[in-house]
Image (spheres, rainbow, N blue to C red):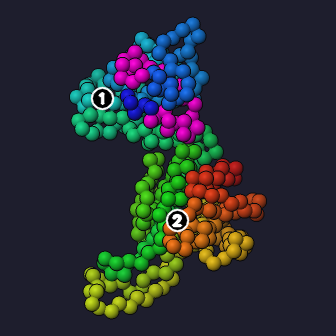
Amino acid sequence: AVECVKLIRELRRYGADVRVSMTPSATTFVSPKSLEWAAKNPVLTDLSGAAEHITHADAVIIAPCSLDFMSKIALGLADSAAATLVQSAISRIPVFFAPSMHLSLQGNPAYARNLEALRAISHVTIFETQVNEGKAKMMAFEEMVARVSHALNAAGKLGGKSVAITLGATRSPVDDVRHLGNSSSGALGFAIADELYRAGANVHAICGDTSVAAPHSPIEIQKVSTNSEMLAALQLVCQRSRPSIGIFSAAVLDFEVANPRNGKTSSKDSLSIQLQPAPKVHAALDYRFETKVGFKLESQLSVEELKKKITHWALEAQCQFVVGNRLEDVHRKDGTSTEHEAHIWARSANAFETIKGKPAIARRLRELLESHL
């Protein structure tokens, strides 16, 4: 129950206006004042003549949902303000259940029957529990909020759209333990994937080498290593899911090792590496996206020179949008990171705008894609 404070704050972080309704039992575990502080709205514990149960919310989240409360909802009981609110909402708006109980309770046959009864209702979503320490705990609040955002934005412009995104860095083996590789954390690609998932899109990520954790959004992630593996994985995604939007944010190698060795080369031996051009993933892909987003990283160019190069390259690569960077604006001379700065080009306006910070870049790209659709 104490996780509810974190859940409410996470919902508000992504723009939700949260109204809390509590059962009498819930108030013995967590204070209504704590949840009022988290939500910045009054907490409902009892009904009055104002008929507070007739909610005008976009959705209801029951978290945590006990065996007792779920059973009451499945049977149509309304013995508290919270239960009455849910019964009023369940036939009109999305209702999300986040069960939490001891494993012995989750094994109750009545629980299984009630789950099936609730799943048969069109607006109901049951979040899977996470078994840990002998308990069926509710889903992590970060993933829960991502899933709720995705569901509520299904009617938006990106709702239901299939998106393929490449991210991270590719490698080329030198021998069985060494490799040649590009430098990329994958952070911006993950931020974009997360942003688009929350906006309702179905995101398929083909992910090279990264140094940051994947987002809490349950996006589809396929790990790859080389340019060829990334291309093959992307081709399979295109065949299976027919994505309308393709985003190429991966740092793919321009050159790969032509003569990789077997085993481990001894450090006592001299080592000569011959490089050859590596396949360009976006150019080699035999699939046409309705909307294509390219990424271009350059160095030792002025911003104006970068923009001219991007404009020419975008036409050649058939991109509707390009996110351009200068290495000097991503890493300092000593190799440390700076606040990510990007110059985003849109074909429709043939114009650039400069955005700073990975979350802001991801958000702006999502807005541009929505306006383009």
Q: Nearer the viewer, mark 1 or mark 2?
A: 2
Q: What is the span of residues highlighted in magenta in the rendered image?
A: 6-31
Residue 368 versus residue 234: which sits nearer the camera?
368
> Which mark is first along the chain, 2 or 1?
1
Q: Name the residue under label 2.
A: 337
Is residue 142 visible to the viewer in this orientation of the structure? yes
Q: Position of residue 186 (x, y in %)?
A: 48, 62
**Vertical placement of residue 208 versus 333, above or below:** above
Q: Mark 1 points at which residue?
A: 101
Q: Which amino acid does label 2 sit on?
A: Ser
Q: What element carries label 1?
A: strand
Separation of marks 1 and 2 at Cα, in angstroms: 44 Å
Q: Which residue is drawn at 50% across and 71% down?
A: 335
**Structural crowding at the residue carrying mark 1, measured as other residues with C-alpha within 10 Å and reported as few (<14), some (14–19) or many (≥20):** some
Residue 258 versus residue 189: which sits nearer the camera?
189
Q: In this view, does 298 lie to the left or right of 213?
A: right
**Vertical placement of residue 343 versus 220, above or below:** below
Q: Which residue is drawn at 55% across and 70% down?
A: 332
Residue lying furthest front = 334
- Find out whether the residues at labels 1 and 2 contact each other: C-beta distance under 8 Å: no
